[in-house]
Amino acid sequence: MNRYTIDMLETAERPNLIPFQDTQYSWTDDLPVCKQSGVGFSTNQIYREDGYRQEEHPFEDRSFHCRYDDSTFLYGVFDGHEGTKVANFAMQRMAAEILLGQLNGKSTDEEVKDVLRQAFIAVERGYFDSIGDLLAERTSLQFDIPDGLNSYETYQKFPHLVDKLNALNCELSAGTSAVVALIYRGRLYVANIGDSRALLCKTDTNQVLRVVQLSVDHDLRNEDELLRLSHLQLDIDSIRQGSRLGNQETTRCLGNYLVKGGYKEFEELASATTEPIIAEPEIHGGIELDESCKFLLLMSRGLYKSLEEVTGIDQVNIKLINFAVQEFQAQSTLTGVAQAVVDKVVRIHHDINMSNLQSTVTTGKRDDITLLVRNFNFPLPHALKSPTNQSVRFNPIVESVPIITMPENDYSSTGITEENSDLSTTETSSTSDIYPDTRSTNKNTRIKSYVNFSEYYENVEKRRQEGTLPKEYCTLKLRT
């Protein structure tokens, strides 16, 4: 019996604070939405030559962006795998583990970071507490299959048990990466596990835009993670040659009981002295949100991985910031900014995959994508604003404002300048084009006619001379 089974037996009678339901609805939906943020997304796609839209699996990303009070904001992006079960659970429980009094009395960065750390641990513990029935069913099925049989013999004699056991193992493999950003008393904290990513765009002393990655990619390219695994007596050379660790690609995640409670069942993990896949987050902060901080991007791996795949470069952070800056100039809402960036990456990935270029190595499909944008003070020149004057007239003349985009070669690995982006736009219409002129006017001024009746009067006069004018119009006095 492994540690997680023991923990669940010990806590079987402990009630959950918030009942978990694997549905689209979350109690976080009732929290006030942060108006300074927006979310864009795109479901996964398998590319077909006939252009027909086909998804490989249901959308597995989840996110929230809420305002708790004037000094507390919380954001999260959860990139689920093997189903939505853990991503849904984390979305519902994470906010409760941070915002329901845990921050009271916390003033130092270390205290706030500890709240975030404990929240991740509590979410995973709560999830494993919720799947006791699945584990009991799995254990029962394993007891029904005699020992000493190989895989082929087992399936030949007990096919229905094997099929049911495989389905349970798939459900128990559900997990999620997560990136959570907390703004608390004017400071920013970011915690993540897995390969969801957080990017902060800020200016340096020379007003050059800099891109700062505030998350850590917990994958097999991370040398620090490989070093951690080597300390657990794992064969790192063998791990480097593969693309997965157990049954997943990341070295940290929430959930996935099969590779945590049952890691000894995987050949490459069996020699580990303790659990190699962990839920311990890496936390950055607190970062003072001053004038240099422009905006924050939280994203699932599908966004930057799609761009990496078709561009052939590992570092795509600057390109994503480039896209975001361009859309800040063009869009009128933050949701529009986020969705436009997602759509641009999706279009690039689709076009390259469908172009059949021999030099391009593509997979023929794309993963789910979620992008959350939180603005601090970056200009959104076309933001929609409510009119201050209730007397508004319709102006049928539509004039477009020129959108000045940033050339690709204006970017470098060291950053970009706000001057290059030319965020100031020239308005082509004055205020009076939209709102009535409130200046005083003469009430007795004659209004110029705006309908031409000359043709009507000419026809009346013609018919009067011909004698065909009706009697009631015979006495009509025409205006000269």
Image: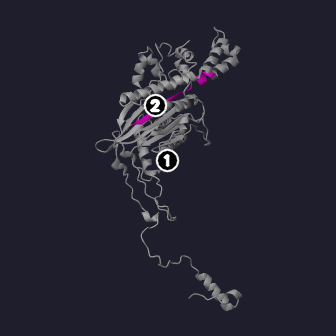
Taking the spot 68% from the left edge, 17% from the top edge, the residue there is 161
Q: Secondary structure at mark 2?
A: loop
The kind of residue on which mark 1 rests is Gly
Residue furthest to the top in view is 148
Q: Is residue 364 visible?
A: no
Provide the residue span drawn in magenta: 168-184
The residue shown at (39%, 49%) is 379
Tell me the quarter of the picture where residue 6 sits. Answer: top right
The reply to whether the magenta stretch includes residue 240 is: no
Q: Position of residue 337 (x, y in %)?
A: 47, 46
- Which corner quadrant of the image does residue 5 belong to? top right
Instruction: Find out whether the residues at labels 1 and 2 contact each other: C-beta distance under 8 Å.
Output: no
Q: Count the labels in the image.
A: 2
Relative height, residue 82 to residue 52 (above, below): above
The image shows residue 422 at horizontal and vertical percentages of: 36, 52
Identity of the residue drawn at 46% across and 64% down: 435
Residue 185 drawn at (x, y percent): 38, 37
Q: Which residue is mark 1?
A: 336
Residue drawn at x 47%, y 42% as measured from the top left? 34
Label annotation for residue 95: none
The kind of residue on which mark 2 rests is: Gly
Horizontally, residue 100 falls left or right of residue 170, namely left
Pick the quarter of the image with the N terminus. Answer: top right
Q: Is residue 317 above or below residue 20?
A: below
Upstream in sequence: badge 1 or badge 2: 2
Q: Residues within 10 Å of mark 2 (few under 14, many from 20)?
A: few
* Residue at which label 2 appears: 101
